[in-house]
Amino acid sequence: MVNMRDVADRAGVSIATVSFVLNGTKPVTAATRARVEQSMADLGYRRNMVARALASRRTHIIAMAYPALEHKFGMSTAEFFTSAAEAARKEDYHLVLWPVGNDGVELRELLGQGLVDGVVLMEVQLDDPRVGILRQTGTPFAMIGRTSDLEGLAHVDIDFDATVEEAVGHLYELGHRRMVLVSGDLDDPRFHAYGPWVRTEDAYRRVTAEYGLETVVLPCSDTTRAGQDVTERLVREHPGTTAILVLNEYAALGVVSALNRMGRAVPDDFSVLPLLMVPETAVLTDPELTIMRTPGPELGQLGTEALIRQLEGADPLPPQMVPAKLQPGGTTAAPRA
């Protein structure tokens, strides 16, 4: 088995220098580092992560805490994971996914095992129990999302105000004056304080009031079937509607399928605009959805960077708000005359 002595001999350096390169405990010149890393590659040397963790008291593993029992995995969710993993890899960290609940019970148990150096929180509640647990245990963390009280908390998030403003503005410019927001179901105990749904509704009520429009918000669970059911209700109870904004990507697919089944043309009879979606999901409907393209890649990277800066003792990353951006498709157009 290749060991550090073999690497040192091949690179013409001391074992201590190889250790400095592996563990980052002392600076070495760029030329020396390159020589050591080339020797490791030539010899097929693999780092002993357990020994490294024992020596440095750090694992160089960070966890992304995602409450999978409450929130479905979607294509937009996957973008957060993959961009976070890539950002971690570039800084010589490994990212693992922890599908732990929002109540924080599993999170506390896992933290007690000392498996990770820090945590990136996803799907943040306005009053999130996980934040208190992370603070109590002294675990470094950053949030992709926001609690109500952000004092001293590293966070990045979607700019829901700017996202809703652009979406409503796009439909208004096309001539739509009767819109409906198909939002999340805040009466569901799991989601009554779920930040993205609360902030989107608040922004929508504000923006439609500024435009002088009637504000209609229909709750909907995060399933395709729920999207179909709410569409039938919408057509029945709000017959003058010409444009539908949809918060959840699964529900948006249900909205389009229900309209097609009911013989309502998209976008001639109804324009449909999902507020948070990725292009891979948009192409699943006919016509392809016009979407507000979710900033998952940016936020996954920024949230991971915010955590790693804490772990490395670097200057903190200022809070970042990134809006979703309009991506044209075939489901928005001017309403019929």
Image: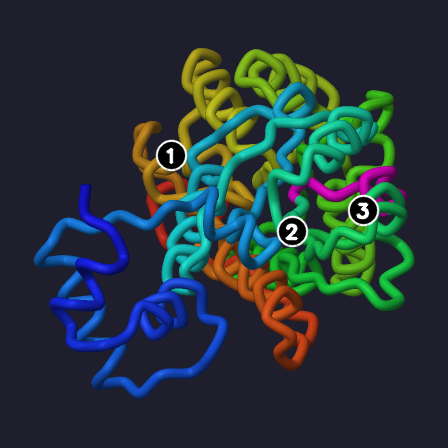
Give amino acid for label 1. Answer: Thr
Question: For mark 2, what is the residue?
Answer: 118
Q: Nearer the viewer, residue 65 or 243?
A: 65
Question: For mark 1, what is the residue?
Answer: 281
Q: Residue at 51% x, 20% y: name it.
A: 254
Q: Is residue 86 left or right of residue 323?
A: left
Q: Nearer the viewer, residue 283 or 10?
A: 10
147, above or below 133, in the image:
below
Mark 1 is surrounded, within 10 Å at the Cα level, by few (under 14), some (14 to 19) or many (20 or more) other residues, namely some
Residue 152 seen in this snapshot: yes
- Measured from the top left, where is residue 299 in percent x and y? 54, 58
**Quarter-wise, where is residue 192 in the image?**
top right
- Measured from the top left, where is residue 316 in percent x and y? 67, 76
- What residue range appears in magenta? 122-131
Give amino acid for label 3. Answer: Leu
Give amino acid for label 2. Answer: Gly
Q: Is residue 148 left or right of residue 78?
A: right
The residues tagged by marks 3 and 1 sit, at their Cα atoms, a distance apart of: 34 Å
Contact check, label 1 and label 2, Cβ < 8 Å:
no
- In terms of secondary structure, what is the magenta stretch mainly? loop
Q: Which mark is residue 218?
A: none
